[in-house]
Amino acid sequence: MREFTEETLTDAVVARLARTENARFKAVMTALIRHLHAFVREVELTEAEWTAAIRFLTATGQASVGDRQEFILLSDVLGVSMLVDAVNHRGGRGVTQSTVLGPFYIEGAPDLPMGSDISHGGPGEPTEVSGRVLTPDGKPIKDAVLDVWQTAPNGFYSTQDPNQDRFNLRGRFRTDASGAYFFRTIKPTSYPVPTDGPVGTILNAMGRHPMRPAHLHFIVSAPGYETVTTHLFVDGDPYLDSDVVFGVKNALIVAFTPKAGAKTLEAKYDFGLKPAARKTAA
Ligand SMILES: [Fe+2]
């Protein structure tokens, strides 16, 4: 067949995957093609809308330069990142729940000694963050690495702000023999995701605000355990119920309370890591 109709085109495109060798890739592409075609049929996409969509995706790619990742942000605000997270991390008792990575992570944050101040004495409410990294049955995990990053009080991550050092408010900490970690920082603030690019335009068109509730980001890893990418959210934040990227989970909300006898807040949280699935020989 060389001529296709509205009714036969989808099956014809899927049939061209007949010689695709990778079974998983074939399954993913088949579903992608069927869902994309179904979407076009359902909304009866106009040519002007299709052109606008191509322009939007092109602009999203063009805005993803250097440390800026507009496509992760797009995935985040459409709830796709949290859905990928949900189907991949179904958790379990004693395992810290995961949430979005977000677009502001950079590799290479310095390894810092326990108790270091990642704000380097910068502005903000001084805060001590501490806790332990544990197995699901509560045993300490030694040498777990916590890769931490957060915003400055102006709402910007270091990579968005030429007035901050590249690794300001970022650092990597390692647990001791009791699984404990401890670092100093400042209380994070709620902040808007960047609205000066294509994602800002589409949020505005949908009538949505761009705010995220205040949080600390963590990637917690240890040999033999599944890595957890997550946040700790500040209890009481006004945006907990309307996070623009749908990332909030109740178990990740932590009280930042005044420390007795000190002009410092403290936040405590124990992370739980799940043992990695054993790889069987092929
Ligand atoms: Fe963030």
Image: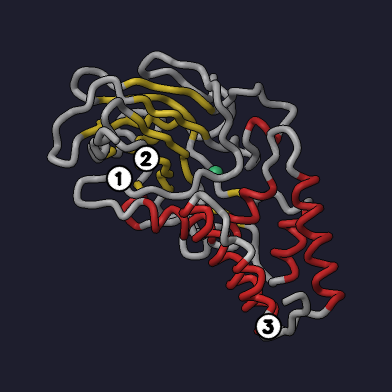
Q: Which residue is mark 3?
A: 41
Front of the two marks 3 and 1: 3
Residue 163, position in %: x, y?
72, 26
Q: As drawn, is 55 to the left or to the right of 144?
A: right
What kind of residue is marked 1?
Answer: Thr
Query: Which residue has dot 2 on it?
Result: 228
As rendered, which of 239 and 15 lies closer to the eye? Answer: 15
Ligand 1's image quarter is top right
Mark 3 and mark 1 lie on one chain; the one further toward the N terminus is 3
Compared with 224, 217 (above or below) is below
Q: Answer whether residue 253 is visible to the viewer in this image.
A: no
Closer to the chain start, of discs 2 and 1, is 1
Give the Cα separation between the discs numbered 2 and 3: 39 Å
Camera-side mark, 2 or 1: 2
Q: Height in image: 135 above or below 174?
A: below
Query: With respect to residue 60, does 168 lie above or below?
Result: above
Q: Label 3, secondary structure: give it.
A: helix
The residue wearing badge 1 is: 96
Residue at the image position 80 percent from the left and 45 percent from the top: 62
Q: Are marks 2 and 1 in contact (CB under 8 Å)?
A: yes
Do callouts 2 and 3 mark residues in contact (Cβ within 8 Å)? no
* Residues under numbered marks 3 and 1 in contact, where contact means CB atoms less than 8 Å apart: no
Residue 165 appears at what percent x and percent y?
A: 66, 21
Q: Residues within 10 Å of mark 2 (few under 14, many from 20)?
A: many
| Residue in view at x 39 percent, y 13 percent | 113
Q: Nearer the viewer, residue 79 or 217?
A: 79
Front label number (2 vs 3): 3
Query: Which quadrant would the N terminus be assigned to in this image?
Result: bottom right
Query: Residue 282's image quarter?
Result: top left
